[in-house]
Amino acid sequence: MNLGAVFLRLGRFDECERYLNNAIQFYSRQNDTALLPYAYNNMGVLLKQHGKMKEARESYYRALLWSRANQNQHLSMLILINVATTYEIEGRTRKAISYHVKALKLASKSGNKVQQATALTYAARQYAIEGKFYKAIDYLKRAIKLREELKLVADLASSYEALGMTYLLSNHPRDAENYLLRAENLFKEAGATNDQNRCNIYRSYLAIEQGHMKEKPGIPDNFDTSSETFENGLYQLTIACSYMKNGDLDAPECREALHGAELIFRNLPSLFWLGKLQK
């Protein structure tokens, strides 16, 4: 099974599937119930990467059956989150939330604060997508409290970023700016340059949209403006906003930035930021 996991990380899916099937058959013959759920879980991950969500869930359910039989709560929680992500990909937010909440209950029962914070953060993001911002904010603040106790800097920064984005989505720019700044500083402390840059771009966008910044924002350190990433899409939108706020909508640089942002957000896709472009 370990070799199958290696092939999975390398993106060699056919070989990965063959080795995982062999592992499942071998563990089943040996009645090795300890390793069997890991093999089924890895098969679920493989199928999900192939876009086969229904088949992935079937494999995850088998993994969950055996992990529960072994009382492996850590693995069971991870499997529940994996099931939730298949529903996220399909846009079935409520189903995704239901499995994240199951994972949260399991983590709370075991008393594992790391897993509780993870489950809270995943569920919060789905609540935000549903527009239930009050619920998302409550979950994220609970996750932040746990991660502050655990002193997990990078994870804490991620929770602050998610909280800042939730406030941005719910049209509370001052709170968004506050939490995104905290996230940016924590990512800097953790040495996570890309994440730090992303928060910096978010804050630049907010500053321009709120009229607090008039000039075009500078390029963050080690930032690739030619990449087709969400961060670059947001950066291009921020550049365009700086021109629009100054009444330079017809400037070639503005139109080029708008076009670049639209292409990126359509390819991802990112409906919220496409909506911002249309405005």
Image (cartoon, grey):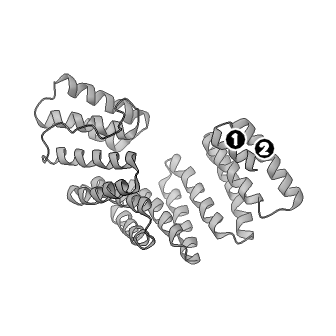
Whether residue 127 is visible to the viewer of this picture, yes or no, is no
The reply, left or right, for residue 207 in relation to residue 226 is: left
- Pick the front one: 119 or 54: 119
Spatial CA span between label 2 and label 1: 9 Å
- Residue 116 — which label? none
Q: Residue furthest right?
A: 29
Please rate how many residues cluster around mark 2, counting C-alpha atoms within 10 Å: few if below 14, some from 14 to 19, many from 20: many
Q: Is residue 208 above or below residue 243?
A: below
Q: Quadrant of the C terminus?
A: top left
Return the residue found at the far top: 252
- The percent position of residue 169, horizontal first and vertical second, equals 30, 53
Q: Which residue is mark 2?
A: 19
Mark 1 neighbour density, 10 Å: few (under 14) some (14–19) many (20 or more): some
Q: Which residue is mark 1?
A: 7
Identify the residue shown where x is 34% and y is 49%.
196
In percent of the image, x 22 and y 33: which residue is there? 240
**Residue 278, located in which quarter of the rendered image?**
top left
> Residue 81 versus residue 159: which sits nearer the camera?
159
Residue sitting at x 80%, y 64%: 33
Secondary structure at numbered mark 1: helix
Q: Are marks 2 and 1 in contact (CB under 8 Å)?
A: yes
Residue extending farthest to the left is 247
Q: Position of residue 228 (x, y in %)?
A: 41, 32
Left/right of residue 80 with respect to residue 43 in the rendered view? left
**Left or right placement of residue 251 versus residue 32 in this view:** left
Decide which of 211, 157 is in the foreground and name it: 157
Q: Amino acid at mark 1?
A: Phe
Quadrant housing residue 235: top left
Q: Amino acid at mark 2?
A: Tyr
